[in-house]
Amino acid sequence: MEVVFSEKDLQIFANTLRALSLDQVEAANSGHPGLPLGAADFASYLFCNILRFNPQDPKWAGRDRFVLSAGHGSALLYSLLAVFGYSDISIDDLKNFRRLGSKLAGHPESHLLDGVEATTGPLGQGVANSVGLALASKLLEARSGEAAKFRVFGLVSDGDLMEGISYEAASLAGHLGLDNLYLLYDDNKISLAGPTDVCFSEDVKKRFEAQGWIVFEADGHNFSSIKEAFDKAISSKEQKPRLIIFHTIIGYGSPKANSHEVHGSPLGKDATSQTKNNLGITWNQWEIPQEVKNIVEQVRQRNLQEFNLKFKSGLERNSEELIISEDKLEHYYTVAEALSGKATRDIGGEVLNQMAKDYEWIVGGSADLEPSTKAYIKGGDEVSRENFGARNIRFGVREHAMAGIANGLALSGFFKPFVSTFLCFLDYLKPSLRLSCLSRLPVVYIFTHDSIFLGEDGPTHQPIEHLNHLRSIPNLLVFRPSCVAEVVVSYHLAFNQSQTPSAIILTRQPLKSLKFSFDLKSLFKGFWFVHEAKNPKLTIVASGSEVVLAYETVKEYFEDSVDLVSVFCFERATNLKAAIRTEKILLLEAASIPSFASKLELVNFMGMSRFGESGKDSDLARYFGFTKENLRKVIDSAL
């Protein structure tokens, strides 16, 4: 069923979106009217003529994905969802835009509202999410033996394309030839503080062409031009992602059009009224005209024909399918135990490979560090434009985009992605990791080279402060295992999350073996007693490589008076306080001392108070006092 809408139809549809967006911003006395006014025309054309979606089944696997990377224009997206009849958004919801308790957050949040495909707002994130979603479609297509048939359309702004993550993500998308990816560039040459030419004068068309994209241009307020650009982009047979540059006027129709003043502030009652008059909007506030309702019904009928698209191989996922069985734990432990005494990165690499043999939905890669992080699926081949059936993604030295793309893979609902790099490079990707946590996406972050003991690369690569950073982020599990059993359980718990990302922190240096003789499931609580003293007066709480140091020291000098607890995941250790048998506690980690510990003196802490040095790991241990002799002195002073 082909539906053709006249320019008059599309204009009244676009103006309805503009009116509803203005109504939201004015009701909230807060928001960004500029983008909805400027982008409404090409957004209307996309939703009315191209996009496949079903508001009655918003999670339909075959739907196209629309990502509003320019998340400050959320009023436009909410207007689209309300007009098309998504069940969990109504006109009353629009009236509560940006208010406490509303599903209509200031910037879109995917877990709050059906039809919001990605949590966006920090600029550039939606570009990487769109690349991840398009890649997920390609991976599915290769596995199903037929076209997965979902495309990804991302609406991006000038600010999105200034952010470094967009360069990284676009580069990889071009390299992989993601021809199911369309970025719609709202090119209005205005940003929050003024015209873009004060800081942004590159030729965006040439930039994307140089990165392997095919680029089209259109007048964003002329429906004939919009149609021509979309037709060319969609009909192109080139195996390249597409960028359509829509030249628009920010705040179109308003007294503040083409000015940064319309970007992020309400127009006010009088200017809003004037804008509606300028656009020929004669209907009432919050009203959806009957002509628009008729268009919506025709679009609904057209999309119903596409609704039954399914993947023949049964690749639709549900939460039960994305679970690693507890019955596999002992097998993974038995295989990994052969690596006892090696670095936890080596043990982790083996556990990852064992899990990947059993579960096809585990895919991922590293930021050009797989030989060092060991996060590589052996025999899984490498994803390329010729081989989307592979499982290893070579992200290149693009940490920020790597994490943002992984969020897109997770948003697809079909994969549990992992990414890996050195822990010191957390700062390059933390904005995307934070959005994993906020969006409730179970991405598994594998960080190796976790402390000063990585050695000669020196303080630039020694991440003493990052454990504190990670543990301060809500909805993130941070695992720092010290032995084979803890590594196995860390990977099991991380890959079994449905709404929580995980960070697994691993060593470069080998660790002496710690014997674990309990039920592996007992580790699900995040800690265990490595040593229990007959008459405990002090408890050492440690993680990772420092557990081994503590164990050797306690066994040699304090076997009767000091308990040792390995806490490899503080977020799961909810019963730790009740389990500790002493009032005195010593925290031991080769990491920066938490401010609460050092300033309030709530606990004793043996850690780092400065950046590291270059040198062999054994020399660094002596230099910074991570030796049995020094730990003995610290314990003596604490008893």
Image (spheres, rainbow, N blue to C red):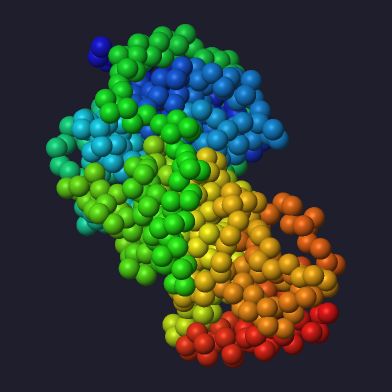
| Quadrant of the rendered image containing residue 556 | bottom right
| Quadrant of the rendered image containing residue 154 | top left
Query: Is residue 351 positioned above or below 506 on the image?
Result: above
Query: Is residue 400 positioned above or below 273 on the image?
Result: below
Left or right, 519 with reference to 455: right
Compare residues 602 and 62 and report the one nearer the observer.
602
Q: Position of residue 17 (x, y in %)?
A: 48, 25
Compare residues 414 and 544 and report the one nearer the observer.
544
Compare residues 611 and 444 and report the one nearer the observer.
444
The answer to whether residue 98 shows anywhere in this view is yes
Q: Position of residue 541 (x, y in %)?
A: 70, 68
The extreme left residue here reads: 237
The answer to whether residue 215 shows anywhere in this view is no
Residue at 25% across, 54% down: 379
Query: Is residue 607 positioned above or below 386 on the image?
Result: below
Which quadrant, please, contains the C terminus?
bottom right
Q: Position of residue 350 (x, y in %)?
A: 39, 60
Residue at 44% across, 82% down: 457
Residue at 56% across, 15% down: 287
Circle count: 0
Left or right, 30 with reference to 236: right
| Quadrant of the rendered image containing residue 372 | bottom left
Residue at 48% across, 33% down: 319
Which quadrant, please, contains the N terminus?
top left
Left or right, 340 with reference to 284: left
